[in-house]
Amino acid sequence: MTTSLKLYSHESANMSIQAPNAEALRPSMKSQRLNELKNACALLADGLSGFDDLIEKYVRVEKRNRRDTPSRDCERFLEWIETEVHLTDQQRDMIVNQQSRHAVEFVALKQRIAHLRYEEILSNSQPFNKQSAQHLGQFVHMNPVHVWATFDTHTFIEDESPIPATVLFYPASGSVQTAVIDKQSEQIIRELEQGPQKLRTLLKQTPKEERETFLEAIQRLVSLKILALASS
């Protein structure tokens, strides 16, 4: 939001009163920006050494664009950190985590109608059973709001997951979720990014020796709410 401040100078006395008030706004605005940044980038607070000092330095040297939201200011702060600080692999993952969550929020705004449709499909879908043939004629839909990323450490994923790990960020159950995606699941998701397909069609495209693990992957992705099945 852009605020326009008009100073009227009908009398010199009024000018002398208003000028200090205008100056007084500056520290208040700076404090507000600091607080907004700390809230928007809160996921970094515990893992980034000198977090508060870095934010204060960033605010001093980087002016805020008038159209910047706190989230966008945080994104600029993250980009600035990468040029100013020698980061460990763990800290890089922390930045990737923060950036990806912001990206999900941005995509959700852009894909609002598509995401509402997907939520409707989810609410009407039945649990997937890989042993049942009733799903074969249904269409498999991909959650339209998702962001790909890579983690180089186990900071945010289970220790048994191989690294580097391909991960997917997406909204589900009222928050941003993260899932480690294996090669077969990635192939399924990449295919469905082009549009919904019948499960029967996807299964026929899969080599016979891989169909069991394919159905297991579908079942896992459905349980995670990354995929949903519907009759159309």
Image (tube, rainbow, N blue to C red):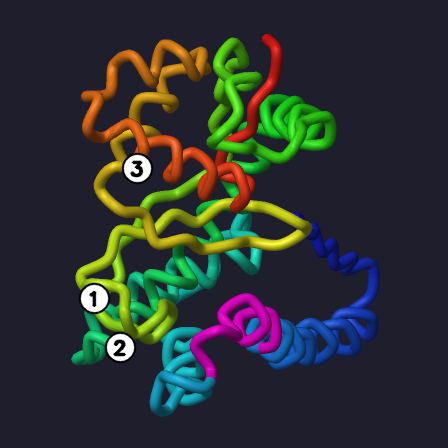
The image quarter containing residue 117 is top right
Q: Which mark, residue 213?
A: 3
Element type at mark 2: helix
Question: x, y percentage for residue 112?
Answer: 62, 29
Element type at mark 1: loop
The image quarter containing residue 75 is bottom left
Question: Image check: 35 left or right of 195?
Answer: right
* Residue at the disc numbered 2: 90
Of tags 3 and 1, the one toward the viewer is 3
Q: Residue at x 45, y 15 (%)?
A: 196
Question: x, y percentage for residue 220?
Answer: 45, 43
Q: Residues within 10 Å of mark 3 (few under 14, many from 20)?
A: few
What amino acid does circle 2 point to?
A: Gln
* Residue at the disc numbered 1: 152
- Distance (Cα) linking label 3 and label 1: 26 Å
Question: Image check: 77 left or right of 13?
Answer: left
Element type at mark 3: helix
Which portion, as a residue range, is magenta? Answer: 35-45
Magenta region, main secondary structure: helix
- Distance (Cα) linking label 1 and label 2: 8 Å
What amino acid does circle 1 point to?
A: Asp
Task: Answer whether residue 41 is magenta in the image.
Answer: yes
Compared to residue 97, the image places residue 34 above or below, namely: below
Of tags 2 and 3, the one toward the viewer is 3
Q: Residue at x 54, y 33 (%)?
A: 129
